[in-house]
Image (cartoon, grey):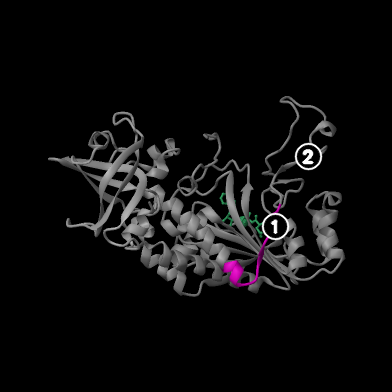
Amino acid sequence: MPKVSIVDILAAKVPENSEALVEGWVRTRRDAKGFSFLEINDGSCLANLQVVAGEEIAAYDEVKNAHTGAAVSLRGLVTASPGGGQKWEVRAAEFKVVGPAAPEAYPLQKKRHSDEFLREIAHLRARTNKFGAMFRLRSRCAWATHDFFRARGFFQVHTPVITGSDCEGAGELFRVTTLPAGGGKIEDDFFGREAGLTVSGQLEGELLALALGKIYVFGPAFRAENSNTPRHAAEFWMIEPEMAFADLRDDMDLAEALIKHVVSFALDEAREDLALFDRFVEPGLFARLENMAGQAYARLPYAEAVDLLKTSKKKFEFKPEYGMDLQTEHERFLCEEHFKKPVFVHDYPAAIKPFYMRLSDDGRTAAAMDLLAPKVGELVGGSQREERLDVLEKRMDETGMNKENYEWYLDSRRFGTAPHAGFGLGFERLLMMLTGASNIRDVIPFPRTPKNLEF
Ligand code: 4AD
Ligand code: MG
């Protein structure tokens, strides 16, 4: 007996009047005289399958026990549905409750629940329409990312999760230790030295780019950022390509192409799931995404961005000032109100950027870029890297770094150094941009945020 997915039945990939074995979870059941209608969802797509089970089947008692949330297994004929609303249905001949769900106790009854409530039962929320759609979309966007790089000759590399270096130098490293609570000597610790969870795979990624030419990292990053904002998670996933023999412009071109590819892919291949967000989360989502896939993004130097903010009529909580980081309100003004599309801001003051970014000839700015996108603010952060050994060492000294820990990194500049560039794209922020979700906690199955370590 062929086991079939509901997505295939609904796409008419299963011949009419053939037998099928369907397994999934009951969304609703409606009893009529002598038979019942069940809506079954198996996670393969947003839509449910209608199942008709009449009292002539031996297991009709089982049907009456199939409450919302129960796992069921059934066998029956795939037929054209006479009722409106669906094309196909299955007439059950055999029916079994595999795992019951008590009707009074199951928290997900047929009504709309708030995101806040669902966050509290994140272990069950993937069974709702919205979160099922979200996590299918998340997976598809990961496929699209791999497709994108593969088609362009990039190799995926796996960089360490446990590391001894702090790429961003922002002091947000989670420590990794086997020392007993309360302390102990660092020599006795597992690695015999300070260790932490990676904040970015970039530094190791650079080493591989200076060997394989074009690489990307797609892995988790960890930051003990105390900012309890809707856009920051302590554990998030980052896509980090790195290209040898490339400059900042190549970097921006690559980021723009990647985003357009993923957005187009989602519009084409995840339309049913996206439509849920267009309908219930952000009316007009499709138009916004089509816009993002279709038009060139704005690009302007940081100094011009600051001028633009200063001369705008907008009242900001934080006054824009040259030499300061752009605040979220500034970023949103630029992409949502001024340009009304994604904006690359580039050539930031070197002083507010990490050590590895290439110092420009003016001696004040670094070859850095951030992509600011409507809805999420900073979506991408990247740069051309400092490939000149002397300039890099000077910068490391200025920022108070211990060069001894980075000899391996400096070696890449001692031997066969070459211009190179890369960026990091926050995968959760990409999903927020794609769905209109306003909280990062709703685009990752089990979010990690300050004071929150459920599951
Ligand atoms: O701008 P960031 O800090 O850049 C880096 O880490 C570079 N080493 C990347 C590189 O060049 N290879 O982070 C890159 C992106 C941000 O633009 C944002 O989208 C995301 O990562 N990000 C976060 N996403 C969720 N939660 C957080 N706490 C994040 N911090 C950064
Ligand atoms: Mg950044």
Q: Which residue is mark 2?
A: 194
Q: Residues within 10 Å of mark 1 (few under 14, many from 20)?
A: many
Q: Residue 66: give x, y in percent of width and height.
A: 29, 36
Q: Residue 82: give x, y in percent of width and height.
A: 17, 57
Q: Is residue 216 left or right of residue 428?
A: right
Q: CA distance from mark 2 to mark 1?
A: 19 Å
Labelled disc at residue 442: none
Q: Residue 407: give x, y in percent of width and height.
A: 85, 54
The residue at 55%/35% (across/down) is 453
Is residue 155 rendered magenta in the image? yes
The residue at 57%/49% (across/down) is 236
Q: State whether label 1 is within 8 Å of ligand 1.
A: yes
Q: Is residue 407 left or right of residue 205?
A: right
Q: Is residue 95 left or right of residue 43?
A: left
Q: Earlier in the sequence, mark 2 or mark 1?
A: 2
Q: Nearer the viewer, residue 402 or 399?
A: 402
| Quarter of the rendering containing residue 418 | bottom right
Q: Which residues are magenta?
A: 148-159
Q: Nearer the viewer, residue 246 or 17?
A: 17
Q: Is residue 347 above or below residue 424?
A: below
SS for callout 1: helix
